[in-house]
Amino acid sequence: MEDFPERSRFDDNQIAYNGNEEFEQPPEQQYEEFEQPPEQQFDSGRGFETNHNVDSEGNEFRDSFNHRDSAAGKLFVGGVSWETTEEAFTNYFSKYGEIADSVIMIDKHSGRPRGFGFVTFADPGVVDSVLEEEHVIDGRVVEVKRTVPREDMGFKGISKRKKIFVGGIPTSLTDDELGEYFSTYGSIVEHQIMVDHKTGRSRGFGFVTFENEDALDKVFSEGKIHELGGKQVEIKKAEPKRGGGDFSGSAPKSYGGLGGAAAGYGAYNSASRYNGKMGRGYGGGGYPTYGTYNNYGGNYAGSYAGFYGGYGGYGYGFGYGGPMYGNAGYAASGYGMPAGYGGNTAYGGGRGYGNGAVGRGGGSGGGSYGSGRGYDRSGGSTTGRYHPYQKPVDLEEEANDNFASINGSPIGGVVMSFLVKTTNCHHLSSTAMAMCSSFCPHLPNHFGGRPAYSFPTKPLSFSFKAFSSQASNASSEDELPTRVGFLGLGIMGSPMAQNLIKSGCDVTVWNRTKSKCDPLISLGAKYKPSPEEVAASCDVTFAMLADPESAVDVALGKHGAANGMSSGKGYVDVSTVDGATSKLISGRIKSTGASFLEASFSGSKKPAEDGQLIFLTAGMQSCDKSLYEIAAPLLDVMGKSRFYLGDVGNGAAMKLVVNMIMGSMMASFSEGLLLTEKIGLDPKVLVEVVSQGAISAPMYSVKGPSMIQSLYPTAFPLKHQQKDLRLALGLAESVSQSTPIAAAANELYKVAKSHGLSDEDFSAVIEALKPKLQQ
Ligand SMILES: NC(=O)C1=CN([C@@H]2O[C@H](COP(=O)(O)OP(=O)(O)OC[C@H]3O[C@@H](n4cnc5c(N)ncnc54)[C@H](OP(=O)(O)O)[C@@H]3O)[C@@H](O)[C@H]2O)C=CC1
Ligand SMILES: O=CCCC(=O)O
C-alpha cells in the first residue's frame, strides 16, 4: 500500500526532506544509533529536544522553564491522549504535590499534541510515589518515567555544531568540488560525499565540517538551499553521532528494534521492563500525529516526532511497520507489537517478532533503511545490531527472521500458502520471500542475490517464476536511460514522472488533459502532443492510465503509443488493468519489434511522491528481458521494491488480488467504525485499538481519523477501487474461485459510486453504509 530510499541519488534524502518535511535531521543522523532506552531518551525532556527537535531557528517548543534546574522533580509522561488538555494533565498530577511546571508537547507543524509531556513537582520527593503507581488520564494509561538531565547522558558538547549535512548533491559532483564550494564560507576540517558502499556511487548527500561555528552561521545566512554543480542542494545542521552501535545484550536489557530514523524501539523488552505489558513499542513518535492517508508510516509514525523515533512522539504501537509494509512480524506467542514505527518514510521495515513468551518488537523503519534488527528469538540474548543501512541484508539471517515472523503473522495463512523453497531470491521481506518460487531463476548478476535458506516446500499451483528485489540492489550498475516517456499524469502518474525528472532522466510527457503536463514541463519535462510522438521520441515509455479502456486506447488507439514503437524501444504499462488487457497491449507492442513490460504496483499517492512504490512486474521472458534491465533503474527511482512474477498478466493479477483484499478491508473497517459509533463507543478509540493489534494496517490508522470526520481526501479514487474489485472478481471467476467477501464489497463500492462518490478517496465507501445512502 501506500505511503512509504536507497538510491545513489538525492531521493534517498528526499524521503527525509521532500517527502515528509517533518524531520529536521538529515538521514544520516536519523539513523544514528541510540544508546539510551526510550525513557532515557525522553528523559532529558525539553533539554533533549532542544538538541534534537528544534530547528536552526530554535523555535519549536514552548519552553517555560529551565529543565536543568528542575530535573530532580521532573517526570516524563508518555502515551498522553490527544484529548487530554494541559489543564487536565496538570490537575491529574497535582494530587501528588505542588506542580512547578507541566507541559504537553505540541507538534510545531501541525499544532497537534505529540502524545507526551513533562510534569515537574516542586518537591522532588514526591516523584518516587508517582512512579510507583499506574496512571490513567482521560481513560488512557500513561507511562511515567524519571527524567535525567542531559548532562548526565553524555551528550555534552552537542551544541557545538560545526558540521552540516548537504542533501541533493548531483551524483557527478566530486568530494573536492564539495569542499571547494563550502570553503568559501570558512575553513573546512572535513568534507565527504557519502557513497554506496557496494557500488561506490554517490548517494547524493554528504557532510562538511567547518573549523568553527562562524562558518556555519555564514553558510546558513545564505539560506538552506545552495546551488552546487548546477543543482540545488539543501543544507541542514548535522548532529554529532553519539556512541553505541552494537546493541547486543541480554534479554532484560535488550531493546526491540533499533531501527532507522525514527526507529522505534520495537517492543522494548516489554515483559521485564514494563512489568509484563506487552509490546509497548516506542515507535518513531508515531502516536499522536496522524498523517494524511497518503503518508502511511511516513508522516504518521515519524511525524514530527523529532528525529530519533523514540524521542519525540511516543510510539505505543501507533507507528507503522505493520503487516502490510513493515513486515513487522508477530511472535507466535505474544507479540512484540507490529513495532516498526518508521520515521519519516517509515514503512517500518521492522521485523518485530519474538519466539518466546516475551514479545519483542522489531521496530524499524525510519527512512527507508532502518534495519530495525532488534529481536529475540528465544528470550535469551538479543541482537539489536543496528546498521544504518539495512541493505544488503544477510539473506540467511533474514530468511530465518522472516520465517519466524511469517509463522505468527496475521498474513501468515496467506503467505504460507505461497511459501516455497527459494534459491537465489534476493530477499526483501517476508512477503517478498514468500513470493519467490522454488523455480526462482538465476537472477541477473546485478541482483546480487545469494542462495537463501529453504522454506518448507509447498508447491505452487502457479507456474510463474517469481523473484523480488530491493530496488537499490538490483539496478546499481545500470545507467538510467536518457529518454523516458510518460503517458498519463493523474494522481499517480504526475509524482512518478516527477521523480524520474528529478533523478535526471530526460522525460517527455503526455496527458489527455494537457494542463496536467504543465507542472512537469516547468520541472524540465518535454511535451509531445500524442502518445505516438512520445513513444517515437523515447527509449522507454511508461503508461499510467485509469483503466483497461484508457490503457488500450492510449497504447493502441489512433496516435497511440504503438504507432511510435519500434525495435529497440520499450513500453512499460504501470496502470492497474486485467491480465487480458495487458496481454493485448503486450502483443501489439511486440508486433512493432519493441518490448513490453507489465509493471503495476502497490502504493498510492504518497509512496509515489516518495519513490516508495512496490512494483509487480512481469513479462521479462523472451524479448523483454533487456527491457526489464533497462526499466529496472527507472522503477527504482519510483519505487522501493520490485517483484518479478513471470508472464505478462501475472503482475496485473497480483495487483488485482492485493486490491481486492484492500477493498474488502476498507469495507469491513467502515462497518466497524459505524457500528462502534452506533453502540455509543468512540470510533477514534476503535482506530487506536485496531492499530495496536494484529489487524493493524496503515490504511486504518491513517484513513480512520478522516473517515470519522466524513472526509475523504483522494489518494486512491473510489472508482478505481471498484474497477479493481470488478476485475478481481473476473479473475476469480476465470478460475472458479469463490470470493463472496470481495463480491459484497464490490456492491458497496458500486452503491458509493452511484451516489457520486467516484472521485472521492475509496475510504468514502463508508458513506454507502450510512442510512441516507441506503434509502
Ligand atoms: N491512486 C492510487 O492510489 C493508485 C492508482 N493505481 C491505478 O493507477 C491508475 C491511475 O490511477 P490514478 O493516477 O490514481 O488515476 P487518475 O484518475 O488520477 O488518473 C487517470 C489518468 O488516466 C487518464 N485517462 C483516463 N481516461 C483516459 C482516456 N480515455 N484516454 C486517455 N487518458 C485517460 C487521465 O487523464 P486526464 O487527466 O485527462 O483525466 C489521467 O492521466 C489506475 O489504473 C489506478 O487503478 C494504482 C496504484 C495506486
Ligand atoms: O491501487 C491502489 C492501491 C493503493 C494503495 O496501495 O495504497
Image (tube, grey):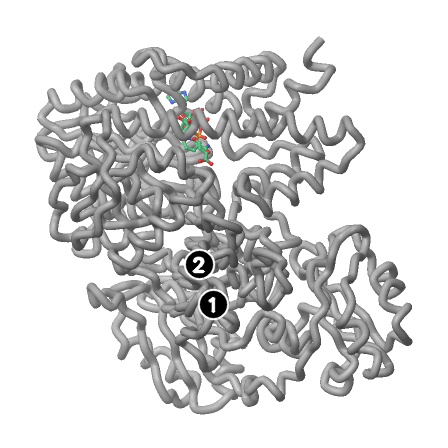
Is residue 108 toward the left or the right of residue 330 in the image? right
Q: Is residue 226 visible?
A: no
Question: In the drawing, does residue 574 fall left or right of residue 155?
Answer: left
Identify which amino acid the numbered label 1 is placed on. Gln
Q: Nearer the viewer, residue 456 or 161?
A: 456
Looking at this view, name the residue that lies furthest to the top: 775
Q: Residue at x 55, y 18 (%)?
A: 749
Residue 30 got which mark?
1
Does residue 5 lie above or below 483 as drawn? below
Instruction: Give 591 or 577, whichever is nearer the viewer.
Output: 577
Residue under pointer 2: 367
Which quadrant, please, contains the C terminus? top right
Q: Which sits earlier in the primary sequence, circle 1 or circle 2?
A: 1
x%, y% of residue 494?
A: 41, 38
Callout 2 environment at 10 Å: few (<14), some (14 to 19), or many (20+)? Answer: many
Say what secondary structure mark 2 lies in. Answer: loop
Above or below, comparing residue 643 to residue 390 in the picture: above
Q: Secondary structure at mark 1?
A: helix
The residue lying toward the viewer, choosing from 731 and 334, is 334
Image quarter (top left, top right, bottom left or bottom right) of the N terminus: top left
What residue type is disc 2 on?
Gly
Tell me residue 375's x, y (percent). Answer: 43, 61
Task: Say above or below: 470 vs 257.
Answer: above
Residue placed at 42% from the left, 61% from the top? 378
- Asked if the residue under mark 2 is in contact with the one under mark 1, i.e. CB atoms within 8 Å, the reply is yes
Name the spot of residue 30 as percent of width and height, x first: 47, 67
Marks 1 and 2, how far apart in space?
8 Å
- The residue located at (69%, 14%) in the rendering is 773
Q: Residues within 10 Å of mark 1 (few under 14, many from 20)?
A: many
Position of 404 compared to 668: left or right? Answer: left
Q: Position of residue 148 (x, y in %)?
A: 66, 81
**Ligand 2 falls in quadrant:** top left
